[in-house]
Amino acid sequence: MQIVVDLNRCQGYAQCVFLAPQVFELHGEEALMFRPRVPGDQHERVRRAAAACPVQAIMVGEPAGLGAS
């Protein structure tokens, strides 16, 4: 799983940090840091974090090339 966060849209509500602290981290009051490649044991947490984002700034997907023949 791979994620992208639209940092222009992100408002620093930090719902993602509470739901998936191993993937998302808030530095200061508004600087969001995140791991673009999500570890397998964090997939469900990240899906919940993306769904909880009030401004829908988190996009979740699979890395390009996976499953391609």
Image (cartoon, rainbow, N blue to C red):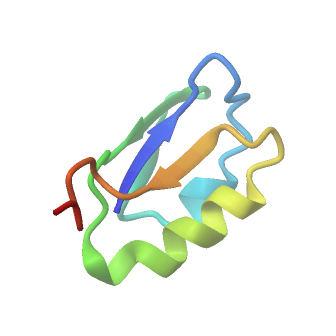
Q: Is residue 19 visible in this depiction of the protein? A: no
* Picture quadrant where residue 48 is located: bottom right
Q: Nearer the viewer, residue 20 or 67?
A: 67
Q: Nearer the viewer, residue 38 or 69?
A: 69
Task: Locate residue 44, reporting x and y percent.
Answer: 51, 80
Task: Locate residue 64, reporting x and y percent.
Answer: 27, 47
Q: Along the horizontal axis of the image, is 22 left or right of 16? A: left
Q: Is residue 51 above or below residue 45?
A: above
Please tell me which residue is depicted at 45% across the width and 55% down the height of the picture.
Answer: 61
Identity of the residue furthest to the left in this view: 69
Task: Locate residue 35, reporting x and y percent.
Answer: 31, 48
Q: Along the horizontal axis of the image, is 1 left or right of 69? A: right
Q: Is residue 28 visible in this depiction of the protein? A: yes
Location of the C terminus by quadrant is: bottom left
Identity of the residue furthest to the right in this view: 54
Identity of the residue furthest to the front in this view: 69
* Picture quadrant where residue 6 is located: top right
Q: Is residue 47 above or below residue 41?
A: above
Location of the N terminus by quadrant is: bottom left
Identity of the residue furthest to the top in this view: 8
Q: Nearer the viewer, residue 31 or 58?
A: 58
Task: Locate residue 67, reporting x and y percent.
Answer: 23, 67
Please tell me which residue is depicted at 73% across the width and 28% down the height of the picture.
Answer: 11
